[in-house]
Amino acid sequence: MKLSLSRRWAVLAGVLTAALVATALAAVAPERATAASGTRCADAGDRYETARPEQVGLDPVTLGHALNLLSVNGSETVQVYRHNCLVGTGIFDPLLGHVPGNNWSQTKTITALLAGRAATLGLLSVDDPIGKYLPPGLGDEAHRAVTVRQLLTQTSGIRANWTRELNLAMPDRVREFLSLPFDHQPGTFYRYSQTGPSVVAYVVQRAVGEDLQDFAQRELFGPVGIPRAHWFWLRDRAGNTDGWSNLFLPGHDFGRIGQLLANNGTFHGKRLISESYLRELRTPSPTNPGYGYLTWLNAGPYWITPSAFASTRNPAPMIASAPADMYFSYGFFGQHVFVIPGLDMVVTRSSGTLNWPPSRLDAGDPLTAVAPGQTTRVEYEFFRLLTQSVVTPRQPAPPPYVAPKPGAVDPSLFVSVPDNLAVAQLGPNAPKGCTIFGCGGKLAAAGTIRSLMDVPRTGFAALTALPAGTAQLARQVPDLLPRLLDGWQQTARIAGEQLPAALPALLASLQQSVGG
């Protein structure tokens, strides 16, 4: 259901052409709900309540520059909230906001919130060993002793390998985890992993006594106003929900998760997640101060990247122009819910292109330029503009932008004979008792079948929303060109500032890589 960049522009061109020949070309403000009270809005109902930026202490011109910059840099949707009010959106929101896209690693934060809901209900403790929730006999003593907290902070100590972990044909993620060797003592070393979060999802499912996705709809998505028709979530072939990725959720629903977090776990007065759990979720972990419970933090003396090429230690904060108390989800291609408690702000973004692409020039070498999990100049500029748009209270100017460190490669994260063999369910690191056909003598197909059944239902819901979104975008045609030009102008400025410094380093790196 994800629209490619070229198709997005084709759709936009069609909308613009139709609108230009239509008789009703006058600028009509998009339909919007009214803020319930002066400077604070109620939690979202059928729609988000809105306010003008100046009503919530924001300068509309500076905020507009921020939104335009982000919109033309690969964003499908962008939304900014203050005091619970929706105060600004991206250029393409009306057209693409209801299209479910892969949330990628933002899924991990949703998994952490489901663990928080289970803990709030008294069904799970983060300090319990996972063996308390696993079936008897599944896994050895050492693996069963890993705690839920260690999985949430990515400190299980289990061997990481991206070739194996990104294998979408893995028959059983839980058995995979329980078959892997320990490279570190649990709780002592941070290593970004795809396997551990899926074990969290499975443990939550066992703790609550029902399918995780049924629990998610009743206890999290439903209470914040996200219908079941809006999302689907892929499973491994054994039927276990992918806790690490592959939740398909529309960008317009991200704000509901943001409001829940900004309201410290309540929505419409109902406590969904305890304050104590959310405090732990956004508390720096000892092994990576830039990470809490499957969630990224903008505080701490340093942070360790989730890069696929190597784990790089970078100076804090993760985004220098954003407040230190900001915490956020981080999905590949730029899926985010940013929460800034001190400013009572939430920012959401969905995207279908490489994270914040133009500012990849600042990397100075091709490896860093394509590495996911590296912060870039566009992020810095967006949050610089966003914080400078805050009139009440005024924010200090941010420190200068510092480009990410040059890239590095840890070959073991890709090339490892036991891990590479495990992709084919062979060797010592393959899930025990599994073959390419399934586990325990059973054909692993249930998860695939259930996933395939979900896709048409959610796709139909997205298609039914397209006509209204197209009409809304057409009404905004008079504003489109100025917004696009503003965003492109800012992007050109950034590229122009970076290119003179980046080009020599980039050419030298390319020459070195080809042995020149």
Image (tube, rainbow, N blue to C red):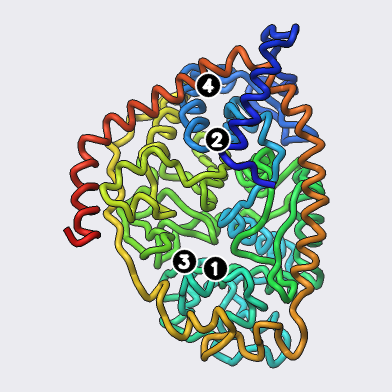
Residue nearer the viewer, 487 or 456: 456
Q: Residue at x 26, y 36 (%)?
A: 499
Residue 57 numbered tag: 4
Callout 4: 10 Å neighbours few (<14), some, many (20+)?
A: some
Element class at badge 3: loop
Q: Amino acid at mark 4?
A: Gly
Disc 3: which residue: 192
x, y percentage for residue 54? 55, 17
Q: Residue at x 75, y 45 (%)?
A: 224
CA gap, disc 3 and disc 4: 38 Å
Residue 166 numbered tag: 1
Disc 2: which residue: 345
x, y percentage for residue 104? 58, 55
CA gap, disc 2 and disc 1: 34 Å
- Residue 396 lies in quadrant: top left
Element class at badge 4: loop
Q: Looking at the image, is mark 2 or mark 1 earlier in the sequence? A: 1
x, y percentage for residue 112? 62, 61
Q: Amino acid at mark 2?
A: Met
Callout 2: 10 Å neighbours few (<14), some, many (20+)?
A: many
Residue 251 vertical position relative to residue 213 in the rendered view, above or below: above
Q: Is residue 83 visible?
A: yes
Residue 432 vertical position relative to residue 365 in the rendered view, above or below: below
CA gap, disc 1 and disc 4: 44 Å
Task: Give the label, 2 or 1, closer to the camera.
Answer: 1
